[in-house]
């Protein structure tokens, strides 16, 4: 089998999570500057067998698209052109940042570590991926 990558896209930085090859476990991979996201994904997919990109779809409480969707759509176009052999799926990412923050608290991370927004993004991507695997 091959891996699935989850992407918690952000204006400045993007959290990335990945499955094991059996697609059982979701793990945080890293957080990258969004302007380096495509090169990072190209490099990663040249070394690892990846079958799918999961990209968070930010929604409002009334189910309408969030403002950040306007930033994600051009990224998806670019991703499809640069890495056309790997499809993407969109996944509702509502509450993942709050869940990530709560996970940090529950795991006993100190206040300084919880201020690390990059870590929140990575954990958010992991939650997106774990949710997808659970509902697959």
Image (cartoon, rainbow, N blue to C red):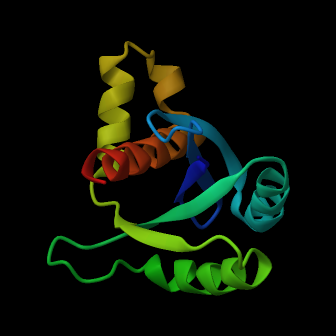
Q: Which residue appears at 57% of the width and 43% of the height?
A: 18
Residue 68 to residue 47: above or below: below
**34, above or below 68, in the image:** above
Q: Percent from the top left, x then y, of residue 100?
A: 37, 38
Which of 52 and 94 lies nearest the eye of the viewer?
A: 52
Give residue 9's position: percent from left, percent from top. 55, 63
Q: Of residues 95 and 83, which is closer to you in this image? A: 83
Q: Residue at x 31, y 54 (%)?
A: 136
User: What residue is at 64 percent from the left and 79 percent from the top?
Assistant: 75
- Does residue 46 appear to the left or right of 69 in the view shown? right
Q: Residue furthest left?
A: 62
* Residue drawn at the location 77% of the way across and 56% of the way down: 45
Residue 9 appearing in the image: no
Q: Residue 111 at what x, y percent from top left?
A: 44, 21
Toward the viewer: 116 or 3? 3
Foreground residue, 1 or 134?
A: 1
């Amino acid at each position: 089998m091959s891996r699935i990558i989850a992407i918690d896209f952000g204006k400045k930085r993007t959290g990335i999570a990945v499955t094991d090859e059996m697609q059982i476990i979701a793990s945080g991979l890293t957080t990258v500057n969004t302007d380096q996201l495509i090169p990072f994904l190209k490099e990663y997919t040249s070394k690892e067998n990846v079958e799918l990109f999961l990209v968070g779809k930010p929604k409002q409480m009334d189910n309408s698209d969030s403002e950040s969707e306007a930033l994600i759509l051009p990224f998806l176009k670019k991703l499809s052109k640069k890495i056309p052999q790997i499809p993407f799926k969109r996944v509702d990412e509502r509450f993942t940042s709050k869940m990530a923050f709560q996970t940090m608290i529950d795991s006993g991370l100190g206040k300084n570590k919880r201020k690390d927004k990059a870590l929140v993004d990575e954990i958010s991507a992991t939650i997106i991926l774990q949710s997808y695997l659970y509902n697959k």
